[in-house]
């Protein structure tokens, strides 16, 4: 592993240099899976002040890195080349599509072995080690294949800069470089770059200050007529895809639209690029604060013995949420129904609007909970809870993430939105306590309590609001049983429109 001069004159190996740079950017936990080509680099994670979380497989590790990046502003993922990087590719593709800045560090065979074209394991056996480089060129915003120790620091700097600027994954390949470098360059001050992460104006500041009528995508939820009647529509980070525009029905005339992105603004059909939109928006903030909306009438208390239904479940669950909570909703009924949640102040919702890879949110929950844990340690104060609404089908795609949650003692509240099909056969073969022990759950440990609970009606669901669940300490699994064919009305309409489009009935 190549060495780089440190500020005190000592030599720093290349992997440690990279991990120290990531530490400067706020990363504290690294996702990844050990493999023979990355084992040496993993030894440098702890000396750099980082923690290796450890994941069950590369796909789940990629999802976790995505979740971590959405909370902390950047994340790191370590795999080996070939089988490892291709296993993580689906997660990297999702991070690219939905703009999550993940730095994917890949341990590869040493340079001399690649130059000789040796037929090594984990490859296609043809000596072509550039194949996987070509694959990742299409799914990352920047790549650094570190073959020259003399240029490695500058390459690392540029890759991390692009990752942050474009908010998309970047790839760094460690090839086991050898050799010494000159003095550490103090001019590469990553603290300036870190400002890109932490100093971003959130749209809700402008919304709260102006009191402008606002709705949040995905799904228009009956707002189309109102939008089309407006003289001006301001959109923050718009994503004009089918699932985010209710089958393209909420798109309006470009002449009345102002689109605001991180570094550009389009007014009508004109585009201004390379702008600091944060500073521009701050100049628009008026001094007065207006109310956001008039709260809707509260729902009547449900009949205790009545089955739980999609029609009111999400609105009722709003009372369960707390300020600064992070809520993840899985693709399908949870993501669609979750649009009806009324979020408390400083709460954040994470879902997939474009990539829609089933099973993503359970893996991402690992990264989100780790980021919450790291933030609590950094700021020396508690953070909000991590709440996941998952479906029983998607749960089976990334189930092994549960063992990672237990292994890292992460505080998670996990609600399965059960529609009653295969989970009974795949999950309920044993009793609930035995099920959690199967994933390595600690038993009789007051410092990390584990709760597994099943609710089949409203009365049983109300009982879940216990002291443990409210506090968000430990692991709470609440299995919410709903009818097999029950789905949010908005999802049913969207699916119907998608089916008609696939059949060519609508353009």
Image: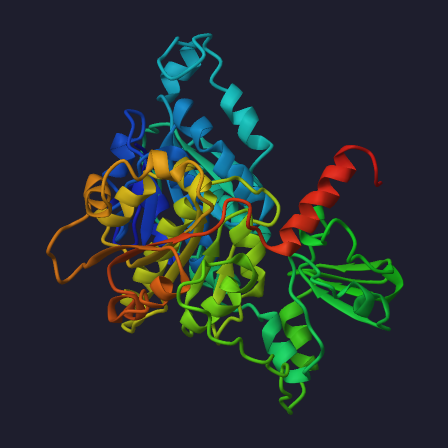
Res. 217 image quadrant: bottom right
Front position in the image: 335 or 496: 496
Q: Position of residue 476 (x, y in %)?
A: 29, 57
The structure residue drawn at horizontal position 31% and vertical position 45%, both measured from the top left corner, is 5
Front position in the image: 456 or 49: 456
Res. 257 image quadrant: bottom right
Q: Is residue 45 left or right of residue 365?
A: left
Q: Is residue 329 left or right of residue 398?
A: right
Residue lying furthest left: 444
Q: Is residue 488 above or below residue 119?
A: below
Q: For the image shown, how many numbered marks are present on the structure?
A: 0
Q: Position of residue 393 (x, y in %)?
A: 45, 39
The structure residue drawn at horizontal position 71% and vertical position 44%, both measured from the top left corner, is 496
What is the quadrant of the C terminus in the image?
Answer: top right
Q: Position of residue 275 (x, y in %)?
A: 70, 64
Residue lying furthest bottom: 288
Q: Is residue 46 left or right of residue 288?
A: left
Q: Is residue 440 above or below residue 114?
A: below
Using the rendered image of the protein, determine whether residue 347 is visible from the camera's viewpoint: no
Q: Position of residue 383 (x, y in %)?
A: 34, 69
Look at the image and name its color scheme: rainbow
Q: Is residue 115 above or below residue 362?
A: above
Using the rendered image of the protein, determine whether residue 287 is visible from the camera's viewpoint: yes
The structure residue drawn at horizontal position 41% and vertical position 70%, both measured from the top left corner, is 320
């Amino acid at each position: 592993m190549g060495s780089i001069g440190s500020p005190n004159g000592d030599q720093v190996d290349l992997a440690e240099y990279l991990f120290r740079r990531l530490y400067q950017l706020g990363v504290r936990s690294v996702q990844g899976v050990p493999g023979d080509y990355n084992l040496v680099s993993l030894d440098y994670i702890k000396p750099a002040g980082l923690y290796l979380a450890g994941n069950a497989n590369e796909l789940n590790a990629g999802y976790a890195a995505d979740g971590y990046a959405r909370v902390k502003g950047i994340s790191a993922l370590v795999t080996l080349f070939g089988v490892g990087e291709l296993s993580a590719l689906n997660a990297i593709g999702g991070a690219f599509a939905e703009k999550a800045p993940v730095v994917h560090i890949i341990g590869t065979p040493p340079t001399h072995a690649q130059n000789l074209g040796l037929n090594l394991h984990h490859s296609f056996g043809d000596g072509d080690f550039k194949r996987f480089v070509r694959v990742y060129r299409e799914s990352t915003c920047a790549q650094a294949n570190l073959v020259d120790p003399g240029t490695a620091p500058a390459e690392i700097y540029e890759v991390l800069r692009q990752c942050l600027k474009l908010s998309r994954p970047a790839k760094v390949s460690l090839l086991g470089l050898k050799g010494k470098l000159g003095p550490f360059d103090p001019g590469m001050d990553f603290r300036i770059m870190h400002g890109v992460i932490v100093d971003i104006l959130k749209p809700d500041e402008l919304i709260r200050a102006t009191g402008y009528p606002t709705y949040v995508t995905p799904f228009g939820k009956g707002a189309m007529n109102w939008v089309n009647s407006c003289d001006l529509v301001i959109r923050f980070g718009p994503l004009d895809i089918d699932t985010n525009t209710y089958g393209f029905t909420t798109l309006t005339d470009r002449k009345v639209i102002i689109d605001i992105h991180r570094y550009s603004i389009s007014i009508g059909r004109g585009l201004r690029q390379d702008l600091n939109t944060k500073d521009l928006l701050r100049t628009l903030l008026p001094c007065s604060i207006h109310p956001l909306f008039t709260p809707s009438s509260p729902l009547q208390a449900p009949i205790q013995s009545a089955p739980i239904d999609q029609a009111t479940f999400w609105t009722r669950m709003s009372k369960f949420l707390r300020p600064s909570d992070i809520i993840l909703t899985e693709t399908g009924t949870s993501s669609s129904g979750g649009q009806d949640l009324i979020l408390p102040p400083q709460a954040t919702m994470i879902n997939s609007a474009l990539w829609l890879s089933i099973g993503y949110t359970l893996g991402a929950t690992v990264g989100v909970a780790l980021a919450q844990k790291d933030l609590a340690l950094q700021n020396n104060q508690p953070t909000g809870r991590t709440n996941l609404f998952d479906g029983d089908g998607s749960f089976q795609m990334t189930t092994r993430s549960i063992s990672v949650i237990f292994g890292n003692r992460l505080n998670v509240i996990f609600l399965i939105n059960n529609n009653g099909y295969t989970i009974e056969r795949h999950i309920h073969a044993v009793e609930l306590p035995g099920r959690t022990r199967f994933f390595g759950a600690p038993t009789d440990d007051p410092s990390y309590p584990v709760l597994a609970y099943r609710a089949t009606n409203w009365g049983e669901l109300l009982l879940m609001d216990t002291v443990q669940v409210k506090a968000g300490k430990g692991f709470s699994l609440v299995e919410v049983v709903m009818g097999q064919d029950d789905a949010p009305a908005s999802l049913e309409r969207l699916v119907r429109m998608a089916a008609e489009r696939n059949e060519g009935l609508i353009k």
